[in-house]
Image (spheres, grey):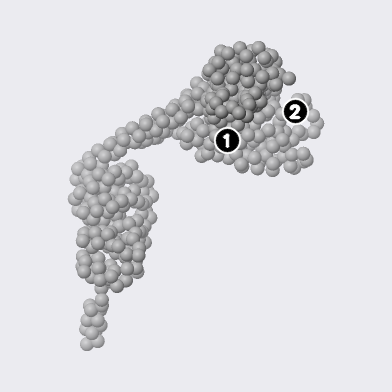
Amino acid sequence: MQRVKDQRSRSTKPPTIHVSAQSGDLPAVQKFLRENPSLLNDRNPVMANTPIHVSAGHNTIEVLKFLLNFEGPEKVELEAKNMYGETPLHMAAKNGCNEAASILLSRGAFVEAKANNGMTPLHLSVWHSLRAEDISTVKTLLEYNADCSAKDKEGKTPLDHLSQGPEHEKLRALLTLYLEKQRKRRASEACSETKAKMDELEKELSKLVGLDELKLQLRKWAKGMLLDERRRALGLRVGPRRPPHMAFLGNPGTGKTMVARILGKLLFMVGILPTDKVTEVQRTDLVGEFVGHTGPKTRRVIKEAEGGILFVDEAYRLIPMQKSDDKDYGLEALEEIMSVMDNGKIVVIFAGYSEPMKRVITSNEGFCRRVTKFFTFDDFITEDLAKILHLKMSNQTEDSLLYGFKLDPSCTVKNVENLINTETTDKQRKEMNAGLVDPLLVNARENLDLRLSFDCIDTDELLTITIEDLQNGLRLISR
């Protein structure tokens, strides 16, 4: 008698919002939420499913629409996850609830959401179709661009879950068709991105005058790296590239630091390095004054440069001119740098005058083994310096002293070239190279300010640097 009474009490237990959502009892769900809106995202005690999980997994469409449109103090959690990490879309997919899946996708449900086992809704819909011989939900997910190459935690794609038998041929053909479509679309997208990245590189290279051999090498690297991106987009497996460590040989002002910065942008742009930062250091930044100071000091610099380029200027100063009984601290710094050059976390560029750098290259076996690319930066001729001056005037930033100023039409490349040739010596040009241009322009602007009167209101005259201003600017440098 007591047992019958207990069964009757259990059968008359009031339903929950989850039970009502499962059965499609819309009036009951509405009543629950009217009385307690916080039940909208309430989780049941066993599976941690919310009402939208339940309605999606049982295809109770009217309840699902009501939950999605419910206007209360909180919105329905479209990407809520149950104890298995499944979203409502997972629930609809694994139960073949195609209409529910369509509604969720149209409302922005994430088609690539992954459950705890790494499975996407497409994985689960494939599983359902194998049991029910119904591929309608698979089709819907594919129409919303579900990734056919997505892998679960076992490394399996949706296609990998199919057996080789003829009974799955229709499903296999469908997945294969979309897989190929997706590969082609990714390749096309990668192509557009590749062109945009190459355009960006060319924009940076256009700021360099001369250096044709080095520009060609940068283009080769960029193209190879970007083609690897496209190969991967097509599903091809290619090994990772490691950019080489380099030596830049040349006098000051020949563009070594500028090229290093462009290289940093390039390697970041194509995903070889995680940042585009270039950490510029000299001997004093690496070498300590006492025993035991150099190692920690150099390691701090290396740590700071990690993920980008470490640019060591005047690198020849790390190796003493002649052998000594005492160990030079510079050698210790060089050894610290070389110890991390094989780990792939940093690219090192050693820079300096040609002759002293050749001494470093020939005197250290480890250096030769790790540094595989050498570039010579020739001195600029006067025509190059004139072109650099024009480029600098065309690319002034808002925080520059020369922002807003322009060159008089008489300041042609040819006229500026003749001026530099007349007002400077070969020795001066060789020692300064492009380092001549910035002080020249600053001096020219100061000369402009000096010759203008306070009652000048001609806007062109106030902002125009003449050939005479440049001439006076050069003469100040020559002194």
Q: Is residue 229 left or right of residue 377?
A: left
Q: Which of marks 2 and 1 is nearer the N terminus?
A: 2
Task: Determine which quarter of the picture holds residue 399.
Answer: top right
Up/down of 276 relative to 253, above or below: below
How packed mark 1 is, by other alpha carbons closer than 10 Å (few <14, some 14-19, many 20 or more), is: few
**Which of 218 and 243 lies nearest the eye of the viewer?**
218
Check the image and report above or below for 415 versus 365.
above
> In this image, 261 relative to 228: left or right?
right
Q: Which amino acid does label 1 sit on?
A: Asp
- Residue named by callout 1: 399
* Residue placed under numbered mark 2 in the picture: 320
Q: Which residue is drawn at 23% across and 55% down?
A: 100
Disc 2 marks a residue whose amino acid type is: Pro
Q: 23 or 29: nearer the eye?
A: 29
Position above or below: 291 against 459: below
Measuring from the top left, give residue 70's x and y in whole percent. Answer: 28, 62
Which residue reaches farthest right? Answer: 325
Q: Where is residue 261 in the image (x, y as percent from the top left)?
A: 56, 31
Numbered mark located on residue 439 in the image = none
Outermost residue, front side:
455
Q: Distance between the residues labelled 2 and 1?
A: 41 Å
Numbered disc total: 2
Name the residue located 65 percent from the left edge and 42 percent from the top edge: 300
Q: Which of 311 and 388 is in front in this view?
A: 388
Above or below 193: residue 156 = below
Compare residues 144 and 44 and report the one nearer the observer: 144
The answer to whether any part of residue 366 appears in the image is no
**Residue at image point 71% right, 19% down:** 478
